[in-house]
Image (cartoon, rainbow, N blue to C red):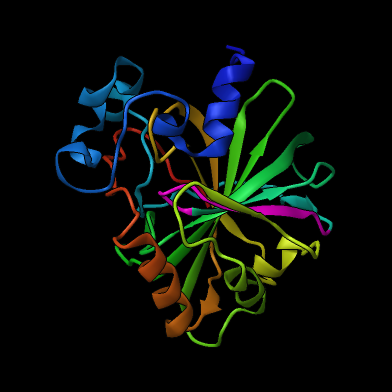
């Protein structure tokens, strides 16, 4: 089913209902993840959906996964604190292709600690690179970060992180998101959803197997700005296969 342009815009901005005049939601308390489905009829999939994200990736099914063809170029445009995450908007022209199907990179953002887990393991930070095809179908490349050396691209982005929710800053230098990708591009794949309201399903999830590194200080800087963890708890896998 083709999404309307409005729905696609809401999905890609990751932000969020209260910014669009909808219901306010948070990561804690009575407006936290356990209550998202009750806050607005548009959020009902957050509680009733059967293909929700994130998940604990395990019990993998062997599959002939074709390599993801990354065609990224420098294109960061603006960095936004939307009150739920730090989001970097990307200029048109960068894409991934999977089995001949092209998705254009729209934005990327972060969660601390990680939303997805791999064999029960949580990571201190997870990046989500959000793509859309011409029909509005979404594909998210997820990258896990483990504690270690500081990440050079994050160091540049964190220098310009807006402190106030709703604040956006233009980036003077166009940076290349390829710097967030591991050298080895093997991945897991499953069908899932947005991890924020409205929790829309039908999202292709492509989780990189090899983690990148991030320093403890970089994670702490991000977490301090968010004031609280910004990860949705893992959801039931149900009957979905997790391919590798």
89 within the magenta span = no
Q: With respect to residue 71, does 151 lie above or below?
A: below
Residue 141 drawn above or below residue 160 = above
**Name of the residue lying farthest toward the bottom:** 149
Quarter of the image with the N terminus is top right
- What's the residue at 65%, 67% (across, down)? 180
Q: Residue 109 in the image: x percent, y percent? A: 54, 53
* Res. 79 image quadrant: bottom right
Residue beneath the point at 44% across and 68% down: 222
Numbered marks: total: 0
- Residue 153 in the image: state x and y as whole percent: 67, 73
In the rendered image, is residue 69 in sight?
Answer: yes
184 and 132: which one is in front? 132
Along the viewing direction, whichever of 187 and 231 lies nearer the viewer: 231
Left or right, residue 89 beside residue 24: right
Instruction: Tell me where residue 130 appears, x and y as whole percent.
Output: 61, 44
Magenta-colored stretch includes residue 84: yes
Report x, y in % for residue 84. 41, 49
């Amino acid at each position: 089913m083709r999404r309307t342009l409005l729905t696609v815009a809401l999905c890609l901005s990751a932000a969020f209902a209260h910014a669009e005049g909808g219901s306010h939601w948070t990561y804690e308390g009575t407006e936290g993840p356990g209550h998202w489905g009750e806050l607005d009829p548009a959020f009902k999939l957050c509680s009733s959906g059967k293909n929700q994200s994130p998940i604990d990736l395990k019990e993998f099914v062997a599959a002939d996964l074709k390599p993801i063809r990354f065609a990224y170029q420098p294109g960061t445009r603006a960095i936004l604190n939307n009150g739920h995450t730090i989001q970097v908007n990307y200029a048109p022209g960068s894409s991934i292709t999977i089995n001949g199907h092209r998705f254009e990179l729209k934005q990327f953002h972060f969660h601390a600690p990680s939303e997805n887990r791999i064999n029960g393991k949580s990571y201190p930070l997870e990046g989500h690179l959000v793509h859309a095809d011409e029909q509005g179908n979404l594909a998210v490349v997820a990258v896990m970060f483990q504690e270690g050396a500081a990440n050079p691209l994050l160091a540049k982005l964190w220098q310009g992180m807006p402190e106030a929710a709703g604040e956006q800053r233009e980036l003077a230098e166009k940076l290349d998101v390829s710097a967030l990708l591991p050298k080895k591009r093997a991945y897991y794949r499953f069908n899932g959803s947005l991890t924020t309201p409205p929790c829309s399903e039908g999202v292709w999830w492509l989780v990189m197997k090899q983690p990148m590194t991030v320093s403890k200080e970089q994670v702490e800087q991000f977490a301090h700005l968010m004031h609280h963890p910004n990860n949705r708890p893992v959801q039931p896998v149900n009957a979905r296969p997790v391919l590798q």
